[in-house]
Structures are given as structure tokens and as C-alpha cells.
Amino acid sequence: MTENKVLKDISGRLTFIYILVLLFSIVIVGRILYLMTFEHSKWSGANSISQKDIIIDPVRGDICAHDGRILATSVPRYEIRMDMKVPALTNNYFNKNIDSLSYLLSNLFKDKSASAYKRSLISARYKGSRYHLIQRNVDYIQLKKLKNFPIFRLGQNKGGLIVNQENKRVQPFVDLATRTIGYYNKGGTKVGIEGAFNKELEGEKGVRLVQRIAGNYWMPVNDGNEVEPINGSDIITTLDVNLQDVAHHALEQQLLKHGAGHGTAVLMEVATGDVKAIVNLKRNSDNSCTEVFNYAVAQRTEPGSTFKVATLMVALEDGYIDLNDIIDTGNGQEKYYNHTVTDHQEGGFGKITVKNALEVSSNVAMAKIVTKYYSKNAEKFVNRLHRMSLGESLALEIKGERPPYIKYPGDTLWSGISLQQMSYGYEVEQTPLQILTFYNAIANNGKMMKPRFVKAIAEHGRVVEKLEPKVLNPSICSKATIEKVKVMLEGVVENGTAQNLRSANYKIAGKTGTARVANKKYGYKYQGVVSYQASFVGYFPADKPKYSCIVVVNAPTSGVYYGNLVAGNVFKEIADKVYSTNLDLQEVEHHALADASERVPYSKNGYCPEMISAMEYLNVKYDNKEITSDWVSTQKKDSEVKLYNRHINDKLVPNVKGMGAKDAFFLLENIGLKVVIQGRGAVSQQSLIPGQRFNSGDRIVLKLT
């Protein structure tokens, strides 16, 4: 009886266990079926994406001015995270150093208290966070300090420190040539030099293995198989920062003075085609000016009177006219079909020479010349324009150039007055840079050079590839015609419409242009108002041309719209600056420079090693006996330059007055300040008071004079 009871009890227990196991199995099978049916897509690829390779972007190369000054650069910024579960980081070591680490983090970033940092770190440690965020947008100087902090000094494998680098593109000179320097974004937009030379600038990408962790974060896995990125090459441009600054401010002042819509100015070196300065400004509603479009490269308009030189070159080359031939312009009006050609001087110029016709910019004279010699063979006139490369694009590396437009007889838009209109710059369209390239060829004795924006590619300061000047047309016309055209262009400034540009120190040759601007919808007049484009293009010194320049100002509203007054003054200011700073253009007696090495110069404050290197190169005596700092200030003595220590406290705003833009920018950026530079020369004012504390990312404005 007892035995049966025991068996019955055991049987009951086994039945109960069996039922439990059965129920548990049903739950497991049900869960599996649920996952396979309803969450299949979520989990089917989980194993395949627990680890993956990510691309590491290299540091993008710098874009530099012709002398190496930086126009665009990538400033490194870092994201700091921490892996709280690295095996080597014991609780004992963590608890022993957490107070020190929290205090140093608070003192470094100044964004929250040490106790707040401590609470955050302890909480992350308790949760076992593998990718805890410490700080974003950390600069290189801060990173160097952080790597020496307790716990972090052990590195990633022992201290859990994770550093992710990002690079931010900045232009130290802000608005100077910003549209030509351009940008390249990951969406594929290519603008300016950044876009044209993206392949050289971007370098080669690296690869890193990362692993998914809790919170859907991807943490780097240090498996020793990383492929390091190769940083991009530097681009050495032809731009001159000082000349760019002069051109920028001269054009800006004229836009504001005359209430103009926009304008452009380009300075080019005659022999090489090197673009030394290029400015494209739009006047905004608040009377500020910004670079939003490259008018020099991409805006194609009717050039007006600057095209008259091409008309006379064609007739001179064909042997139909000479400089002293007489043209009767009558009372300044000549009718062709239903269109009347009119000169700007009331009553006309009467009988004038061909040379005088260009000097006074007579429309009637140009129309009479082409009518007399080309009305029965317009193709000959247009073909000659093409042989002078006026109908060809410049094939620039910079994207956006609009091809020139020159009508041809037989085109649907060719009319009975097209020949006459073309003779003085209408019914043809050119960009400012195309016009300048043509005038530059005249200054270069007929050889047309391709505009060059970049002259070299460098790696770590060493030139690895030179981009040589390129010839577009070895001879746009005969030497005899070139010489005659040069005489006429000098006459425009000496005797004609640009007399206000005459200089006592050097000669300028060029041509004014005042053209009506056509609106596609309304024509040349809208609501009774005619909009004008003022321009001046030429070269200097006229006897030995070294530089050519064009200035175009669109839609001045002040009532003054003539090319010599609106655009010519900008040209003159640029030319005066170039002449005054270039000894090669001036007639200087050799004895005046003979003792140059014996004179003691004034110098800017700056970086000591570079300062000493420059003085030794120039054979200037200096005293650096007491120098123990990297940065120095200078004082001119009777026989030497005295150097003084200038110690920098990276917790306080340094005094950068007296420094050049390069040194000031380098020093301030490296301690975490955002620098805006205004003007040129040495720093005369700074917006943050020297000695005050600052936060990383604060903005400081430097005024240079």
C-alpha cells in the first residue's frame, strides 16, 4: 500500500514536470515562429552587420596663394568618446582617478562642473556604455592635453579613450576670392578651384573596422588591419593676397558709391596669363557686398565699346584702314534701315582719324568702316574675329565658363544691321575674362595666353607638379597691327575717354566701355529706365606691359555710368598698388638699393624660428640672446632687430597686435578661437581683450592695417 502511494506520488510529480517542460517548449517554439514570421526582416541580417568597414576621410589639401599663404584649409576637429567596458580598466583604477579626470575635463572645456562630469562618467560606467560621449568639436590643442589626463593617458585599449576626427573647411581671409576658391561638397557640387582640383585635394580614403554596440553605436575595433588614409595634396594658386585685398575693397567702394548691382575685377600677368586677383561682388539690400557668383567667368554680356578694338584690328589686318585715315562721322548720327547709330557727343565729331575714332569711342565711325569694307562680305569680318580667337572658349579648369557668342551671316538672328551693331559691341556676347584675355594678347605682342589660376601641386611643402602657362593662340594678328593697336589704346588714356586715368609715374593703355544691358524679356529699357554696364580694360605699364586688368560694374544707379568714372577708378587704384609695390616696374637707381642689407627694417611680431630664418636670409642683424619662447615681439634698434619673449597662455586671449595674418591666425586657431580677418598688413586691433578668459569656439575679429 505504501509502495503504491509512493509510485503514485512520483508519477504525479513527473506528470507535472512533463507539463511544465511541454509548456516551456510550446513558448519557445511559439517565440521562434513569431521571430521567423513577424520579425524576420529585422533579425535575418543581424549577424552580417554586427561589424562593418567604414571609410576614413583623409585630410583635404590646402589651397594657397602664390607665396604659400593659406586661402583654404582643413582644420581638424575631434569627437571624444569613452569605452567603459575595456577589460584593462578596473573598478579600483577608475574610482581612484575619476575625481581628477572630472576636474580636468571641466577645466578644459568649461561647459559643466567637475561634479557633473563625475556623475555622467559614473553613470556610464554603471550602464557599461561602450561609446560614451565626452565632448564634440574638440581642437588639436585640447586633444593633446586630454590625452595626458588620468585614465585617458592609458589610450584606447587600457583607458577606453576613443578619438574620432573630422575636418572642417575654412577660408582664413573670409571673403577674398571666395567664389574662385570655391567649394566641393559630398553631393557632387563642384565650384571654383576646390571643385576643379578635387582629385588632387581629396587624397586617398582609408578603411577602419567598426562594431555595433548597444544603443546602435558603431565603435572602432582595433584589430591592426586599418588602412590609413593618404592626405590630399596642396594647390598653389597664382593669386596674390595683397593685390586681391586691394581689388576687393576698391570694387566694393565703387559698388556702394554708385549703387551698382554687381561687379567684377580681374588682374592678370601679361606674359603667363596668371590671374593675380579676381573679385566678384554682389551688392545686397543691406548695402553689404558678398561673392555669390563668378561674374568674371560665367556672366556673358554685350561688351559695348571695348569690342571696338577688335573691329579696328580686323580692318587693319585686312589692309583697309590705317591710323591716320579720315572718317567723316558727320553730326554723330547714321541711319541703317530703321536703326540709327548715334555717338555719345551731341552734334558728333565730324571728320576724325581712325586713331581719334577709338580715342573718342565713336559708334558712327565703327559702323561706317564695317559698312564700307564688309557689307558685301560679312563672312570675312566674322571669320577674322574667329581667327583672333574671339569666338572660342578659354577651356578653364574652373567650371561655369559661358562660351562667347558671335553671330554669323545666315544665322536666324542675323539682320541687316547686325554687322553695324557688332562693330561697336552689340549682338555679340563675351565674359569679362574672355575680353581680358583678348586685351592681354595685345599687350603680349599677339600671343594669347590661357588664364592660369593654379601653378603647382605640392606635398608637404615640396612641389611635385608644375602647371606651365599655356598658349591659346600664338599670334592673333600681325605684329604691325598689334603695334598700331597699342598706339590707339595709349591714345585713349592720353587724349581720349580715359584721360582721368593718366598717371605721372607710368603709362596706362586701355579702352572704356559703356553698354546698355539687355533684359531678355523687356529689351534695353524697363519702365522707361535704361540699365548700363560700365567697364574698363587695359594694361600697364604701356611701354613694357607687365599686367592687364578688366573692371566691369553692372547697373550703377547714381546717374554716373560711364566706364572711365565707374570702372576706370577701380582699375587705377589696382594699377597704382601694383606699381607702388613692384620695384621691377619702377626706374630705381642701383645705388639706392646698394646698402639695403645694411639698413635695419621694421618687422612684425611672430613665430621665432621663422623670424630668425627670414632675418638670416636677408642678412639682417638680430639679438635673440634671451629668447626662450616660440613667439616673439620685435623692436628696431640702430644696428639690429631686438627680439623679446612673448609667452602664450592657452587659457587666456593672447595679444596678437603687430603680428601678420598668418602667424595670428595660426596661434589663435590652435588655442580654439574662431578667427575672422579684416584688412591687410599687421594686426592693429583685436575684438577680444588680451588676457581675458575665453571659451573654445569663441569668435575673434582681427583688423589689419
Image (cartoon, rainbow, N blue to C red):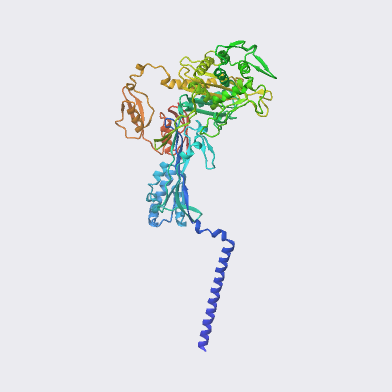
Q: Position of residue 582 (x, y in %)?
A: 42, 22
Q: Is residue 166 visible?
A: yes
Quadrant where the C terminus is found in the figure: top left
Query: Between residues 675 and 511, which one lies in front from this camera angle?
Result: 511
Vertical position of residue 112 compared to residue 608: above or below: below
Query: Measuring 59% from the left and 63% from the top, which residue is drawn there?
Result: 37
Q: Position of residue 703 (x, y in %)?
A: 46, 29
Looking at this view, name the residue that lies furthest to the right: 338
Q: Position of residue 445 (x, y in %)?
A: 48, 21
Query: Measuring 53% from the left and 84% from the top, which residue is drawn there?
Result: 8
Vertical position of residue 229 compared to residue 338: above or below: below
Left or right placement of residue 251 versus residue 656 in this view: right
Query: Between residues 116 and 684, which one lies in front from this camera angle?
Result: 684
Q: Position of residue 137 (x, y in %)?
A: 47, 43
Query: Measuring 56% from the left and 72% from the top, which residue is drawn there?
Result: 23
Left or right placement of residue 623 versus residue 238 in this view: left
Vertical position of residue 524 compared to residue 205: above or below: above
Q: Quadrant of residue 668?
A: top left
Query: Between residues 353 and 589, which one lies in front from this camera angle?
Result: 353
